[in-house]
Amino acid sequence: MAEPIKVVVTGAAGQIAYSLIYQLAKGDVFGANQPIILHLLDIPNMMGTLEGVVMEIEDLALPLVRGVVATADPAAAFNGVEAAFMVGSMPRRQGMERKDLLSANVKIFKDQGEALDKYAKKTVKVLVVGNPANTNALICSKYAPSIPKENFSAMTRLDQNRAQAHVAAKLGVPVDHVKNVIIWGNHSSTQFPDVKHATAQINSATLPVYDAYKDTEYLKNDFVKTIQTRGAAVIAARKMSSAMSAAKAAGDHMKDIWQGTKPGEWVSMAVLSDGSYGVPKDVMFSFPVQIQNKEWKIVQGLELDDFSKSKLKITADELVEEKEEALSICNN
Ligand SMILES: NC(=O)C1=CN([C@@H]2O[C@H](COP(=O)(O)OP(=O)(O)OC[C@H]3O[C@@H](n4cnc5c(N)ncnc54)[C@H](O)[C@@H]3O)[C@@H](O)[C@H]2O)C=CC1
Ligand SMILES: O=C([O-])CC(=O)C(=O)O
């Protein structure tokens, strides 16, 4: 059995953390042979609730959990961590766009970037979930200059899972028979869910999703809109934002960083743009990536038609605007 690793979850008394911690504790993310010490951070007001979460972790009686640190002190929370789930922040309510959370949330990611810089391992892998996730991740990395920029990513895996599940249901196949769906851009209503390069296994044949669907109009319009607005649809129904599915996606994302992607397959995550596909540099843009040895590479050479290029531009423009707004909030 390996030595335990320290894993921090911020917003640990909240909704997403409540589902996420269980996945971490039972080995779904770091593997069945990787013990963990859970570092749980929340704000002082939430320490009572967090105490209850700690009791429940004890009562899970899971052997991989070798310790729990529950705290409101970022220095203790980030000390020596090798993986960070940055969830703690305000969720949106009905009628809001995710970028409306920028003024409330971005400073959290500035402060916690500084704390990661001081206290975390330099190899720490940081997944930002709190919205607006792409821009918060950019800010978090900017304020943690001693940690490589490649170690930061933001979550668009929930959008990928939504798109994959939607296509699978429409085609009447199990969800894992649909592969290589892409989410481009921002985790917002400008994201571009793209199945142009995706395949579906139907009986024993593997077909491009576009050929299996035979409805290009749908895939370019209603499908895109449905995935773009799925988070809002959950809020309208639940009166709270997605939590169980968000936690599952966070686990999927970190698991792929830790354990790598399967040969021939890619996943989507927002990473620092290097200008691939004509996207402006220095925004956290969701690309298809392949991962080995905990390092991601953007999948290159996918052909984009004019329709796709126009979609990438819309979401890239939004990220550039968000970045400027975030920097001006942080500088004030
Ligand atoms: N990227 C994605 O796909 C998704 C992102 N989200 C976002 O995740 C975030 C968390 O959502 P929920 O867990 O549902 O919210 P929640 O309100 O249930 O929990 C958030 C927790 O964060 C804590 N918190 C606030 N400020 C903090 C700070 N400075 N340090 C540590 N903890 C702090 C709160 O006290 C609370 O316990 C929201 O911003 C939400 O919009 C939600 C779903 C999907
Ligand atoms: O929509 C929200 O505000 C929460 C979220 O990010 C999602 O469900 O994708």
Image (tube, rainbow, N blue to C red):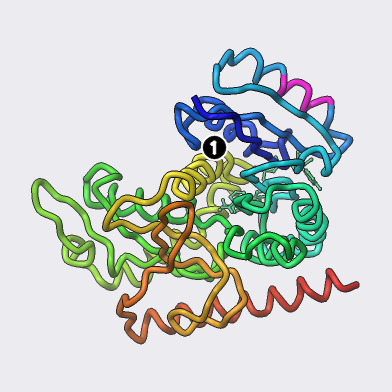
Q: Amino acid at mark 1?
A: Met
Q: Position of 155 compared to 15: left or right? A: left
Q: Secondary structure at mark 1?
A: helix
In the image, what residue occupies the spot 65% across and 45% down? 84
* Rendered position, 61 above or below 15: above
In the image, what residue occupies the spot 42% across and 56% down? 291
Q: Which residue is mark 1?
A: 244
* Rendered position, 184 above or below 162: below
- Verify whether residue 6 appears in magenta: no
Bounds of the magenta span?
48-54
Quarter of the image holding residue 195? Answer: bottom left
Q: Position of 318 compared to 267: left or right? A: right
Quadrant for the C terminus in the image: bottom right
Residue 232 picture location, percent across and down: 57, 54
Q: Residue furthest left?
A: 204
User: Which residue is nearer to you in this view: 23 or 119?
Assistant: 119
- Verify whether residue 52 appears in magenta: yes
Residue 320 picture location, percent across and down: 64, 79
Q: Residue furthest right?
A: 332
In the image, what residue occupies the spot 76% across and 75% down? 325
Q: Residues within 10 Å of mark 1 (few under 14, many from 20)?
A: some
